[in-house]
Amino acid sequence: MRKLHPMSIQMAYLAMIATVASFNYLVLFPINDWLTWGAFPYPVAFLITELTNKFHGVEKARRVVFVGFLAAAILSIWLATPKIAFASASAFLVAQLLDVSIFNRLRHQPWWCGIFLASTLASIVDTVIFWSLAFYGEQVPIVTWALGDFGVKFGLDILMLVPFRLAIRRLVVAT
């Protein structure tokens, strides 16, 4: 398998940092009692992790997770609240490492299996951890926001199959 140019790892780091910072900031803005804007950019983090894992291997995918985690946690303290930054960092790290592990175990299954199962299971874990910590004790609709958040993540996990497949097809054509 042909490796991508090393610059793509730096792009993965930057994309991960931007994605995490954006959903940590956007979670502060509710759309309604079921959803905040933060739900929309989150599934892109799984796509970044899975593409890195597919093209560069599990160790580099874990590095992208850790670098994205550290940089984004610092940015999130500035962009959001410390409580949201902590909740997000905790949920992100556990969910992303779970995603890397599941995807890596399923990498030889049909192309869609690893990305879909890994991102869906990791989205469940992320949702439970984040919403349990971020707004605990506050007078906000945590349960409905968590359900709406997961619904968007699940739908976008399905949509993320398209760019993943296009990237895989591009790799096959280039080799």
Image: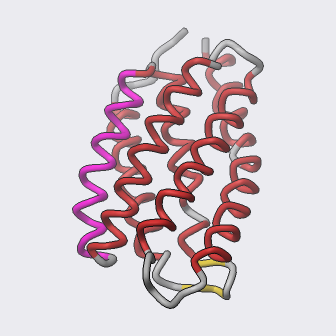
Q: Nearer the viewer, residue 23 or 128?
A: 128
Image: 125 above or below 6: below
Q: Nearer the viewer, residue 101 or 164?
A: 101
Give the side of residue 174 with respect to residue 10, left or right: right
Give the side of residue 112 with respect to residue 64, left or right: right
The quarter of the picture where residue 150 lies is bottom right
Q: Please, what is the dominant secondary structure of the magenta stretch?
A: helix
Q: Position of residue 62 (x, y in %)?
A: 37, 31
Q: Which residues are magenta?
A: 59-79
Image: 118 above or below 151: above
The quarter of the picture where residue 88 lies is bottom left
Q: Nearer the viewer, residue 81 or 110?
A: 81
Q: Position of residue 133 (x, y in %)?
A: 42, 67
Picture quarter with the N terminus: top right
Residue drawn at point x = 68 percent, y = 42 percent: 163
Residue drawn at point x = 33 percent, y = 77 percent: 80
User: Which scheme is used to colour this image of the protein?
Assistant: secondary structure
Residue drawn at point x = 66 percent, y = 36 percent: 164
How many numbered discs, if any?
0
Q: Position of residue 116 (x, y in %)?
A: 71, 37
Q: Is residue 61 magenta?
A: yes
